[in-house]
Amino acid sequence: MEQEVIPAPAAAQKGRPREFCVDKALAEALHVFWSKGYDGASMTDLTEAMGITKPSLYAAFGNKEALFHKALDLYEQEKLEYTRAALEQPTARGVAEYYLRGGVDVHAAEGEPHGCMGLISSLACSPEAESIRADVIRRRASSQHALVERFERARAEGDIPAHIDPEGLTSLLYAILQGITVQADAGASREELERLVDTSLALWPSA
């Protein structure tokens, strides 16, 4: 990703305007939103983590809402790549396994906030931030649609039984993934989450 250096407004400080890396600042904002959710992240939390002033934040990213959308873009790009790679697995069970184990890798990683950034923000979203919730739901629906299409193909190829509903199977997979993110946020160990994945895959419908 190309790094852009933005000078802070001269009025914000004396002497030479401070410069900062937009990419680094956005990455720091991502961690604040990921750990606290949209509503829980204050402007003070964000500016302190990003190492910039409020005028600099507004100049580079717009308002808090716009910053969150950019942070969510980065989150999907860097942390949710496994959801796209899962669709390329040769079997439906392989898709599910890649999806769930990828979820454990991301949402229970050491040194990172636990849980899902989108889920945390959509569950604790004030009426004033309804657009945030709507954006999270829209992104999730797009991801679910891609999974439904993949499982429809698997059913047509005989990879899963003909009586299995691809939409229901997708909903099940999402419910398990959400369970992983909630349990990770509540302090479940990686071993516990891996055991949940193993048990879920043991129940996978075979053709």
Image (cartoon, rainbow, N blue to C red):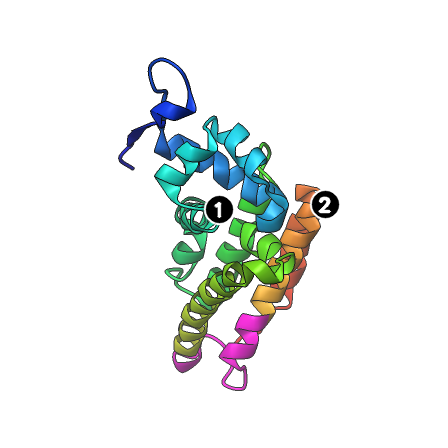
Asked whether the viewer can see residue 17, the reply is: yes
Dot 2 amino acid type: Ala
Q: Which of the 4 image quarters holds residue 118? A: bottom right
User: Which of 1/32 is in front?
Assistant: 32
- Counting from the top left corner in percent of width and height, residue 154 is at 42, 75
For the magenta stretch, what is the residue range?
A: 155-171
Residue at the front extreme, as displayed: 11
Q: Residue at x 54, y 86 (%)?
A: 163
Residue density around tag 2, few if under 14, some if 14–19, many if 20 or more, within 10 Å: some
Amino acid carrying mark 1 in the image:
Lys
**Residue located beneath label 2 in the image:** 188
Q: Is residue 170 magenta?
A: yes
Q: Kindly state the secondary structure of the residue where label 2 is placed.
A: loop
Q: Is residue 157 magenta?
A: yes
Picture coordinates of residue 123 (x, y %)? Answer: 64, 59
User: What is the C-alpha distance between the residues marked 2 and 1?
Assistant: 31 Å
Q: Position of residue 75 (x, y in %)?
A: 45, 47
Answer with left or right where residue 184 lies relative to residue 109.
right
* Residue plotted at (56% across, 78% down): 168
The residue nearer to you, when weighing 54 against 181, is 54
Mark identifier at residue 116: none
Badge 1 element: helix
Looking at the image, the residue that sits furthest to the bottom is: 163
What residue is pinned by disc 1? 64
Looking at the image, which is closer to me, 19 or 121?
19
| Residue at the image position 34 percent from the left and 20 percent from the top | 17
In the picture, the quarter occupied by the N terminus is top left
Q: Residues within 10 Å of mark 1 (few under 14, many from 20)?
A: some
Reply above or below: 181 against 29.
Answer: below
